[in-house]
Image (cartoon, rainbow, N blue to C red):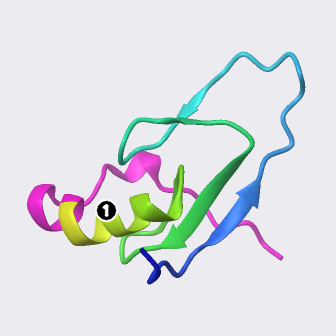
Amino acid sequence: MSDAAGRWVEFDIPWNETSVLNCPVCGKLITRRAWEFGTTEGTLRVCEPDCEQLYELYFRPKHGPLPRDVFVEADPK
């Protein structure tokens, strides 16, 4: 799929970090980087660009937007 309009975000995670982050769309584990994209509800971080399209084309139209607590503030650059 090629219409994704987000960007990769790298995480600086210490070797002894024990908390995990899962993709809010598909549930896969997110480790060193996440695909970040903007929606009408806010900024969302998922495991890969395909999950952006899955969210926009299937999940949101069928189930509605994700809960507010899964959206993040965009990193200022």
Residue in front for this viewpoint, 53 or 44: 53
Residue 16: give x, y in percent of width and height: 86, 16
Could you say which quadrant of the image residue 17 lies in? top right
- Residue at (31, 62) in percent of width and height: 55
Span shown in magenta: 59-77
Can you identify the residue that label 1 sits on?
A: 55
**Magenta span contains residue 62:** yes
Q: Number of marks in the image?
A: 1
Seen at 14% across and 68% down, the residue is 61
Dot 1 amino acid type = Tyr
Query: Which quadrant, please, contains the N terminus?
Result: bottom left
Q: Position of residue 43 (x, y in %)?
A: 52, 66
Please check the rendered image and state whether residue 45 is part of the magenta-colored stretch, yes or no.
no
- Identity of the residue drawn at 66% across and 21% down: 19
Report the quarter where the C terminus lies: bottom right
Pointer 1: residues within 10 angstroms few (<14), some, or many (20+)? many
Is residue 18 found left or right of 25 in the rendered image? Answer: right
Residue occupying image coordinates x 38% and y 53%: 68
- Residue extending farthest to the left is 62
Residue 51 pos. (x, y %): 41, 58
Task: In the rendered view, tell whether residue 76 sits above or below residue 11.
Answer: below
Of residues 50 and 8, which is closer to you in this image? 50
Tag 1's secondary structure? Answer: helix
